[in-house]
Amino acid sequence: MKHPLDKFAYCPVCGSKHFEINNFKSKQCQDCGFTYYANPSAATAALIINRRNELLVVRRAKEPAKGTLDLPGGFVDMDETVEEGMCREIKEETGLEVSDIRYLFSLPNLYMYSGMGIHTIDMIYWVPLDCEHIDIQASDDAAEAIWIPINKVNPADFGLTSIRHAVEKFLSETLRKQKILYNNKV
């Protein structure tokens, strides 16, 4: 796969063709001196667990990985915190309004979009719901929302690599070692 900076042939400031590789993560214009850094975009994913130890998952309505399972989440918008972005994405995709979100870990990711690999840093949150079951309305880029008992979750059903790894890590490390779920059951 090509480096994301290969898509940019001209300086975005002055339009010069002399927009050249500066180092692994940047290009610099030889005419005006502008340097562009390709830093990862901030993204979120929520492990929403209810009192029945069910995980809320969504089915992707759009590419990449259309039709596979995913966790509610998405890109953080400009001028919002990661926490605000996480809560907004949960509301957009499930209709749930949450305030109790707890950061767990992050994973680097390469998200394919419009033929380009977008480097992201995916921040994974645990969202405990103090209830047994809530009817969810999938919307935005979620085709369906499903409650799956934790012991029936199969990471292979998740189409995005970073989300699959997040689910694997959550199931193997967080649940088993820290026992953060209600009733401490797996």
Image (spheres, rainbow, N blue to C red):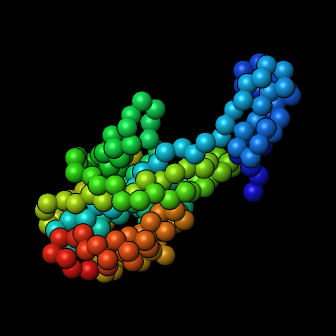
Q: Could you tell me if residue 15 is visible in this image?
A: no
Instruction: From the viewer's perspective, tell me whether residue 84 is left or right of residue 4.
Output: left
Quadrant of the image containing the C terminus: bottom left
Say left or right for 3 vs 48.
right
Percent position of residue 119, x then y: 60, 50
Location of residue 153 in the rendering, given as x and y in whole percent from the top left corner: 36, 76
In the displayed structure, 102 sits above or below 91; it is below
Q: Where is 180 relative to 19, above or below?
A: below
- What residue lies at 21% left-to-right and 79% top-to-bottom? 185
Query: Compared to 63, does 156 lie above or below?
Result: below
From the viewer's perspective, is residue 54 above or below residue 37? below
Between 112 and 178, the one lying in front of the other is 178
Kindly tell me whether residue 44 is visible in this rendering. Answer: yes
Q: Residue at x 81, y 39 (%)?
A: 21
Q: Quadrant of residue 138?
A: bottom left
Q: Quadrant of the N terminus?
A: bottom right
Which quadrant of the view contains residue 18? top right
Number of marks: 0
Which residue is pictured at 72% across the width and 20% down the height? 13
- Position of residue 43 in the picture relative to residue 72 (left or right): right
Most foreground residue, 131 or 94: 131
* In the image, farthest residue toward the left: 131
